[in-house]
Amino acid sequence: MKFWPTWKTRAYLVEDMKKNITISFLVGIIISAAALYFAFRNVPLKALLRYLASINYLWTIPAIIVGLFTFVLRAYRWQVMLAAVQKLNFWRVFHPLMTGFMLNCTFPWRIGELARPIILKKKENIPFSTALATVAAERVLDVSSLIIFFTIVLANLQIDPGLSMTFGSHKLNSETLIAINKGMMMMCLILITGIVIVTVDKSRGVLKGLILRLPALLLGSRMTLREKSEQTLCRPLIRIIDNFAAGFSLVKEPKKILTCLILTFLVWFLSAFSYYVMSLGCPGIDLTFLEISAVMIIICFFIALPSVPGFWGLWEAGGVFALSIFGVSAKEAAGFTLANHAVQMFPVIIVGFVSAVLIGINVWRISHEIKDTEWQSVACETGGEK
């Protein structure tokens, strides 16, 4: 028996997805608007505009070059991860990656993370769940590196224990930063544990055995229902787990892990350096490289929350809070954060749009393509039919 949702069921699910995206987008707008208010409430508009006019924008050129180079490293890292599944040349990896990041900057719900494996599915015939697993592996590496980086930064910087910034009904202080770091560390450990369970043959075998036994445990002697559940749910789920295991296969290859770790370190080191170069042209931002690194990491923690496309609002709130730790005034913090946000974001959108054109992706219809292609991918990977 092959499984595929009826067209009526599919229509309901797609409609439900649309509602969820709309709700998520509205929630993001509310959070971003609140973040913008709290970030700029103490900065008069005229003062902010005067500060933006005082910036030496020549420094944006090297900042943009360094920032874009980090995506070259990200593409090479993804190429290494995908090599276990299929060897692709650099440009066949770079363009889907940039398209995905561009979509994250311009559409809600971070659909760029789904767009990348969908593009590989369409262009390279790599299973959707396998490619998605490599994207997930990237995120685990990024989060792990940020946590380690932040732990080092906290150990080497003197942060005023009395520092406090009100953000709505919450107070942000040094204890908040430590708590956030511990929470992300715990989340990272859980993710790594899950990856190991799925990737290692023995533990994956145990997991697959448990999945196959579930119908018998839940349905008892109802043989027809047990067989239907096994065919329609358990075996498709096992195929997806196997595809994910293929995506995480670099766990079994120490050389590839080392290469990816080095590349991840370089990505975040150069990202921080891009921030630092931008700060050289901004009056009042006299911070060391380590302090700027802390600012970047705190912004990354903030933009992990749901927000409007481009992370507007949360980026600014995180930047103003982080810079206040080092005694930067509200006006200078707001001006630098806003200008740096544009410098980090708009080049990615431009390059990503060019990549989308080159590989034939219509960015205005991508959300609809994602819904349709995701269903097709599941059908293909589970052996189903329309």
Image (spheres, helix red, strand yellow):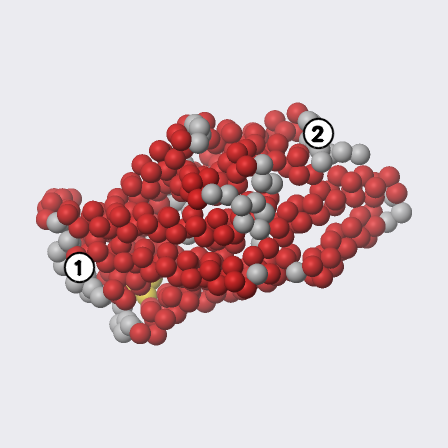
Q: Which numbered disc covers residue 134?
A: none
**What separation in Å lies between label 2 and label 1 (alpha carbons)?**
59 Å
Q: Position of residue 55 (x, y in %)?
A: 13, 49
Mark 1 residue element: loop
Residue at point 58% right, 54% down?
Answer: 248
- The answer to whether any part of residue 41 appears in the image is no
The residue at which mark 1 appears reads as 285
Q: On the image, which quarter does residue 179 sit in?
A: bottom left
Of residues 358 and 211, the one drawn nearer to the viewer in this rendering:
358
The percent coordinates of residue 141 (x first, y second) are 47, 58
Residue 126 is situated, as x and y percent measured from the top left of the image, at: 58, 40
Q: Nearer the viewer, residue 328 or 201?
A: 201
Q: Quadrant of the N terminus?
A: top right
On the image, numbered disc 2 is attached to which residue?
A: 385
Quarter the C terminus occupies: top right
Q: Is residue 141 left or right of residue 338?
A: right
Near mark 2 (Cα within 10 A), the count class, few <14, some 14-19 or many ≥20, is few
Kindly indicate the quadrant of the structure image that contains residue 180.
bottom left
Residue type beneath disc 2: Glu
State whether residue 115 appears in this view.
yes
- Left or right? Give the position of 123 relative to 282: right
Question: Which one is nearer the viewer's eye here, 113 or 323?
Answer: 113
User: What secondary structure is found at the residue carrying circle 2?
Assistant: loop
Disc with the residue nearer the chain's start (2 vs 1): 1
Q: Residue at x 35, y 33 (%)?
A: 354
The x and y percentages for residue 241 are 66, 49
Q: Residue at x 80, y 48 (%)?
A: 215
Do callouts 2 and 1 mark residues in contact (Cβ within 8 Å)?
Answer: no
